[in-house]
Image (cartoon, helix red, strand yellow):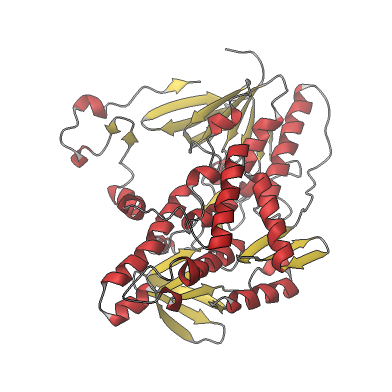
Amino acid sequence: MSNRPRVVIVGSGFGGLFAAKALAKHDVDVVLIAKTTHHLFQPLLYQVATGILSPGEIAPQNREILNKQKNVQVLLSEVTAIDLPTQKLRAEALGHVSYVRYDYLIVAAGAGQSYFGKDEFNVFAPGMKSIDDALELRARIYGALEVAELTENTVEKEKLMTFVVVGAGPTGVEMAGQIRELTSHTMKRDFRTFDPTKCRVLLLDGGDKVLSPFGERLAAKAKHQLEKIGVEVRLNALVTDLDGDGLTVKYKDGSTEQIAAGCKVWAAGVQGSELGKTLAEQSGAELDRSGRVKVNPDCTLPNFPNVFVVGDMMNLDNLPGVAQVAIQTARYSAKKIVADIEGRTMDKPFSHFDKGSMAVISRFGAVMKAGKLEATGFIAWVAWLFLHLLYVVGFKNQFMTMMHWIIAFLSHSRSERTTTRQQLAGRLALKQLGDDFQPTITGSLRPTAIDERISPSANKEEEPQEI
C-alpha cells in the first residue's frame, strides 16, 4: 500500500470527475467512489428521454475517462456511511461491503429530485436525475401514444394524449419543448386512430415566470416561444395532488383545476444527497431546506478542514446547482488539498465565475444570458449547441452527439425511440421489492422468496473488505 496522501472522492458527476482530473499530476493516491459506472452529463438527459440521444453518448464510463490517469482507482459502490473522526467511509455495491480510509475527502454526491414533501408523487411523475429516470420517461412518453392508438374510449384517449411537465426551469422548458416537437413533427404520420399533432403539452410552475433566473425580458421571450410551438404555459400554478389519472392544480387566485394526463414529468426542485445529513450531524454544519450542506468559504466542513463538499451538495453564497459551480468548486478543492500537502498556505476563499445560463426551447430557438449579454433565437441556439458539445466527454461521444443532432434538427427524425417494459416498470418493481432486496451479479441476496431455487450459499454476504 502506498504511503502517499490519499484523496477519496465520492461521486462521478462534474464535481467528482473534475476533482480527480485536477489531481492527475500530483503526488497523491486518488480513489473515486461512485454508485454508477458512468459520468452523467445531466443537462442532456431530456434528449435521452425524448429519443434524440442514446445513454452512452452522455454517460461515458468512469474507467474509460480516467484509465490513463495512473494515480486514480475507480470503485463502483454507494457510500452509505462516513465517519469523520476516524477518516473512514463505508461503501456497498452488489452484495460487497468495503471500508475506505482517507486523508482528504471530497464529497460530490450530487442531488436528487425534490417533491416538496409529496414523495408519493414520484410513482406517477418520475423526475429526471439519472439515466434510469430518462429511460423510464422515454417508455412513458412513447408508451402513452402507443396505448392511445389501442383504446377506443375517447376520454381515455384524450388523457393519454395529454403530457404535463411540472417545473419551468431549464429542464422543464427543454422537456416540454421536445415533447411538443416529438408529437407535432417526428410522429405526426405514425398513428391511425388519432392525430399526434393534437396532443396537449402543458408546462406548470408555481412562480410567475418561466426560466426565472434569466430575468424578465428573456423569461417573456421564452414563454412566447413555447406558446408559439403549442406548449400551454400555466404560471402561479401549484400541484396539490397527483395520481395515475392526472393532477390537481391550485392557482394564485384560489381557483383549482383538474387536468387529466397520462404522462407526467416532474422537473421542479432538488434535494441534497442523504450523505449531507450525515456530514452535518458529525461536523455541526447546517443544512438548508433542500438538504444542502452549508460549508465554509473554502468549501470545507466546520471543524474538518480536510473534508470538502462541492457541487449540488453544498450551500455557499446561494450558488445554483449547475455544472459550472461543481467544476469550479472541485478544482478549487483540489488546489487547496495540494497546497496543504506541500505545506503552502492558501487563504483565498472560493470565488465563483458566472459563465452564464442558457436553455433550448425548440428547434433553432433558445435563450442565453451571460452577464449583461442576452441573446435569443438562432444565435442563442447555435451557442447552446457549441457549449454543450464542448462539455460532452470524449471525441467519440462528441461526434456521435453531433450526428444525432444533425439528424434530429434537420429532418425531425429520432434514432433512439426503442423502449422496453423493463424501462417502464423497473423502478416501481424495485420499490415494491423493498429495502431488503439486494441484487448481486449472480442473482439476489434477499429476499429469497423471489426465487426458491436460490441456495443458502447464494444468500451468504461477503465479509467487509478494507481498502
| Residue depicted at x 54% and y 29% | 63
| Residue depicted at x 55% and y 30% | 64
Residue 26 place in picture, x, y as percent? 73, 22
Residue 139 appearing in the image: yes
Residue 242 place in picture, x, y as percent? 40, 71
Q: Is residue 370 left or right of residue 462?
A: right
Give 39 or 75, whichever is nearer the viewer. 39
Give 324 or 134, whichever is nearer the viewer. 134
Give 262 or 279, whichever is nearer the viewer. 262
Within the image, what quadrant is residue 451 found in?
Answer: top left
Within the image, what quadrant is residue 366 found in?
Answer: bottom right
Quarter of the image containing the N terminus? top right
Q: Is residue 12 left or right of residue 182?
A: right
| Number of numbered discs visible in the structure rendering | 0
Q: Is residue 443 left or right of residue 405?
A: left
Residue 398 place in picture, x, y as percent? 61, 43
Residue 444 place in picture, x, y as percent? 28, 35
Task: Indicate whether 142 appears above or below 72.
Answer: below
| Residue depicted at x 53% and y 53% | 45
Q: Is residue 262 left or right of residue 363?
A: left
Task: Indicate whether 453 appears above or below 228.
Answer: above
Residue 41 appearing in the image: no
